[in-house]
Image: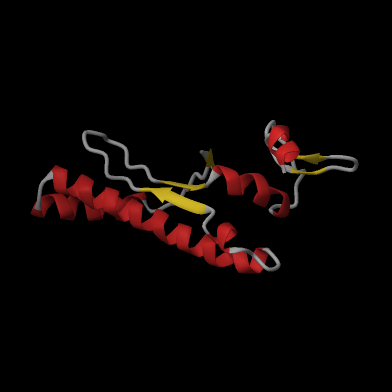
């Protein structure tokens, strides 16, 4: 899986602490953890939906395959103090789409497909011979 590291830093600790204290005064720590995990999962789900919608703006004539590039994992793990959900690009779509994303240098990793000046890189040259 290819992941995009994202750290969110915000000055809302006091508000979150107040919300936590109010929530815990009414229910158990277990329910609070589950509510936090559900909230984080919904954020990842919303982010996945938004980046999928942005594909139409970022690419000219995107295919259905490109629109299915993004996925997420839910944050519903038990017995953990940290709440974590992931948003990621599927590996095969990442190989193709990364050349059209960003303004920095594009790096070709081993196994990537794509064009160069004199060559077309394909994942398995035997498949090209068969074709």
Quarter of the C terminus within the rendering: top right
Q: Quadrant of residue 39?
A: bottom left
How many numbered tags mark residues here? 0
Residue ID at (32%, 45%): 75
The residue most toward the top is 110
Residue 29 relative to residue 84: left or right:
left
> Is residue 17 visible in the rendered structure shown here?
no
Residue 112 relative to residue 39: left or right:
right
Quick one: 111 or 43, which is closer to the camera?
A: 111
Residue ID at (51%, 38%): 1
> Is residue 117 visible in the rendered structure shown here?
yes
Q: Position of residue 48 (x, y in %)?
A: 47, 57
Q: Position of residue 11 (x, y in %)?
A: 43, 52
Q: Position of residue 4 (x, y in %)?
A: 55, 44
The residue most toward the front is 130
Residue ID at (26%, 34%): 80
Residue 81 relative to residue 59: left or right:
left
Q: Position of residue 44 (x, y in %)?
A: 41, 54
Quick one: 80 or 116, which is closer to the camera?
A: 116
Residue ID at (66%, 64%): 58
The residue most toward the right is 118
């Amino acid at each position: 899986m290819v992941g995009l590291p994202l750290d969110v830093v915000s000055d809302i600790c006091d508000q979150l602490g107040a919300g936590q204290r109010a929530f815990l005064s009414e229910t158990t720590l277990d329910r609070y953890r589950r509510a936090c995990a559900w909230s984080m999962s919904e954020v990842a789900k919303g982010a996945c939906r938004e980046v999928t919608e942005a594909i139409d703006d970022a690419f000219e004539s995107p295919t259905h395959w490109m629109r299915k590039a993004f996925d997420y994992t839910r944050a519903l793990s038990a017995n953990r103090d940290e709440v974590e959900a992931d948003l990621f690009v599927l590996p095969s779509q990442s190989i193709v789409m990364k050349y059209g994303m960003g303004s920095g240098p594009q790096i070709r990793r081993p196994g990537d497909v794509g064009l160069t000046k004199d060559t077309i890189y394909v994942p398995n040259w035997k498949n090209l011979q068969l074709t």
